Amino acid sequence: MSSKEKPTLGGQRIKTRKRNIAAPLDPAAFADAVVQIYLDNAGDLELIAKCIESSDLNFSRYGDTFFEVVFTGGRTQPGTTKPDEGERHTYSILDCEAKREVILPSVIYIQKILRRRPFLIKNLENVMRRFLQSLEFFEENERIKLAIFTALAFSQKLSGLPPETVFQPLLKDNLVGKGLVLTFITDFFKEYLIDNPLDDLISILKRGKMEDNLLEFFPSGKRSAEAFSEHFTKAGMGALVEYNDKKIFEVKVKEMKTALTTQISEEVDISEVIETVKQHVKDAKLPEIEVVRILWDVLMDAVQWSGKNQQQNANLALRQVKTWAKLLNTFCTSGKLELELLYKVQVQCYEDTKLMKLFPEIVRSLYDQDVLAEDTILHWFRKGTNPKGRQSFVKALEPFVKWLEEAEEEE
């Protein structure tokens, strides 16, 4: 390069990328505009819905603010339920009467809005979650209105309100401890069950992962089956009490079966197994008939059945009966319970093909081990009421019954 030539810069010019500068947030102006729509239409929700549909307000940015206006009549302070500065209207959900027929139009109105603007579903979740976590800051009548709205929202299958959005925020220790959650959930249940069957409520509880945890709505000092029964019976929800009692019963039966299965598989001494049964019966207040059914189920489930060898299966069943006869004898203390055991054997032999031909042998073994009395067997043979396989089982048992009758005549 000669001394007269001037140096030049080579390379490619890079254009500077323009930054996306977000417009400043102005939720106050948005809230005032929505409030004005309410005021201009004197709270007529159908007219309000039409105005909102045709408006160019930025709902995607101010969705939470919109639902604050719907529920409370205006904007709330960030993170709270307290009213913020700005315009307000008196046609909100919390300003109306605590009656389902008054609140229902608001539920239908929100459903219309969500159909037109489905992106607002998340905002409804946000606001509901915040309000439910802040129940203590609402007046008692406002909490009732929220409960009625929630019940109607589920009843109308309102989009954007999954059960977990309702139930999980309620489980704050301070809210539960003050009894606010129990009162809210009771109002919610009562309102929902006016139009819907209990099965639908249970379905909602299942989806909200609360079906087996209803006692979590109670203050810690009242989490008992007795407290549950007393509270919801007083609230007029006997069907819910019956359902919960059934669930508790099923859990206790499962616990008992699990404990017995473990002991039987480990061949624990029979006296120890008997004590285990007695303890579970005492704790769970299990009916005697249910105990007999459980014992037979557990004993048969513990057998390692052969796939095809019928004779081997027969030997295994009879050995099990002989081994645990004392256990059955301890709890088959009356003719009624013996008959229940015999019905249980009948049903299992009918439903389980590998046991179908073993019915007379099992009955004979139970008789030999003094578990079933002669009178019980003869009663079943002559007057049994369970139809499952009865005709074939009666025929199969005829030789044994004939032997019993002959022995009776000789005596």
Image (cartoon, grey):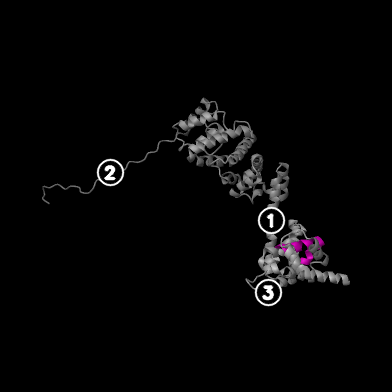
Residue type pointed to by label 3: Gln
58 with respect to 82 (left or right)? left
Residue 404 at x, y percent in the picture: 82, 70
Q: Which mark is nearer the camera, 3 or 2? A: 3
Of mark 3 and mark 1, the one earlier in the sequence is 1
Of mark 3 and mark 2, the one earlier in the sequence is 2
Mark linked to residue 311: 3
Q: Can residue 353 be seen in the rendering of this structure?
A: yes
Residue 183 at x, y percent in the picture: 66, 41
Whether 342 is among the magenta residues is: yes
Q: Answer few, some or many: residues within 10 Å of disc 1's Cα (few below 14, many 20 plus, some between 14 and 19).
A: few
Q: Secondary structure at mark 1?
A: helix
In the displayed structure, 36 sits above or below 365; it is above
Q: Secondary structure at mark 3?
A: helix
Report the span colored magenta.
Answer: 328-347
Of mark 2 and mark 1, the one earlier in the sequence is 2
Q: Can residue 223 be seen in the rendering of this structure?
A: no
| Marks 3/2: CA–CA distance | 90 Å
Report which residue position mark 1 lands on: 250
Whether 69 is among the magenta residues is: no
